[in-house]
Amino acid sequence: MRTLYSETSKLVANCASLAALLEVSAYPKPGNIHRLNDFPDTSYEHFLAGSVALGSIMGELAARSYADENYEDIRLGESILDAVNEMFTWQHGGNTHLGVALLYAPISAGAGKWRKTNSKDVNELRNLIRKVIESATQTDSITIYQAIEKAMPPKNLGEAEKLDIKNKESVKNIQDEKITPLQIFQLCKDRDQICHEWVTGFETVFETGYPYLKKRIDDGASVNSAIVDTFLHILSTNHDSLIIRKKGVYEAEKVSKRAKRILEYGGIDSEEGKRQLWMFDEELKKEDGGLNPGTTADITAASVFVLLLSGWRP
């Protein structure tokens, strides 16, 4: 007989993988890999494999969170590192899901606690995610650093004045000063969207991505249309931090303005919006990944994850 513990693991694992699969399959998300667009060294199939690989780790994390009353023992950072290791075990296309793992882990741990409350209120899920993040320790910080260092090429990391991942003294400082992930992400919240999500209790996911996605679905949009337009909506209101690291704020701002115009045309379900969307995808692809709104895709996947956890099924 299945226990609530194992049911929680299965539910969160399936929601995590399905959300990532739906996000990468939605097309055309301009500048991203999708079912009709590959990058030279990374393909759609690599993302499919990485999406599936994430599931078991997030399910285990949710089950651990469900079973353990002590938030400090959830081992959030360990799960992020495990997810990165699984990602590389199951595909050879490079870093497909680091950003997703960084977003999914607090959501998964929060979902484990949420299942225990029997609450259906998504705001309660957000409150529990905040508690998970606030309870993470310096040990979580160190394993998160290990995950990022393993997954990210140095050229994509950018520079940090304090606790730079490329500085070998950073881990020692974290250990000696007991610096938590929340304290670290406070330092980068203004230049990195994933750091911003951790610090603000997933503000963009819960206040921009998820509600817009839910409304599009509730209004009868197809899954593909809802996800693509949600991606555009997030991009139109937030400069993508991956583009900022690669090409600078000016280029990121231009991409956001273009996404906003496409939505003003009516998005993917309007004739002109669809035409502009395909043109935009072709233009961004010419930059060899330099104008890939990859962080926006990660936040879109997290928004789909929350929608699935809330009970929606495609």
Image (tube, rainbow, N blue to C red):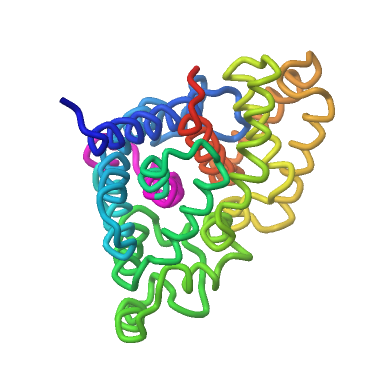
Can residue 288 be seen here? The reply is no
Where are the magenta residues, as a range?
87-109
Front-most of residues 225 and 248 = 225
Name the side, left or right, on which 249 lies relative to 53.
right
Name the side, left or right, on which 252 lies relative to 155.
right
Q: Residue at x 33, y 52 (%)?
A: 80
Q: Residue at x 37, y 77 (%)?
A: 167
Question: Which x, y percent locates residue 104?
Answer: 42, 45
Question: Which x, y percent locates residue 224?
Answer: 58, 19
Residue 181 placement: quadrant: bottom left
Q: Residue furthest bottom?
A: 176
Question: Which x, y percent locates residue 58?
Answer: 32, 42
99 is within the stretch colored magenta: yes
Front-most of residues 269 and 55 = 55
233 is within the stretch colored magenta: no
Name the side, left or right, on which 209 lies relative to 314.
right
Q: Is residue 122 above or below residue 175?
A: above
Label count reads 0
Q: Is the magenta region chiefly helix, strand or loop?
A: helix
Question: Which x, y percent locates residue 205?
Answer: 59, 45
Q: Residue at x 25, y 43 (%)?
A: 60
Q: In which quadrant will I find the N terminus?
A: top left
Front-most of residues 220 and 119 = 119
Q: Is residue 4 above or below residue 132?
A: above
Q: Is residue 298 above or below residue 229?
A: below
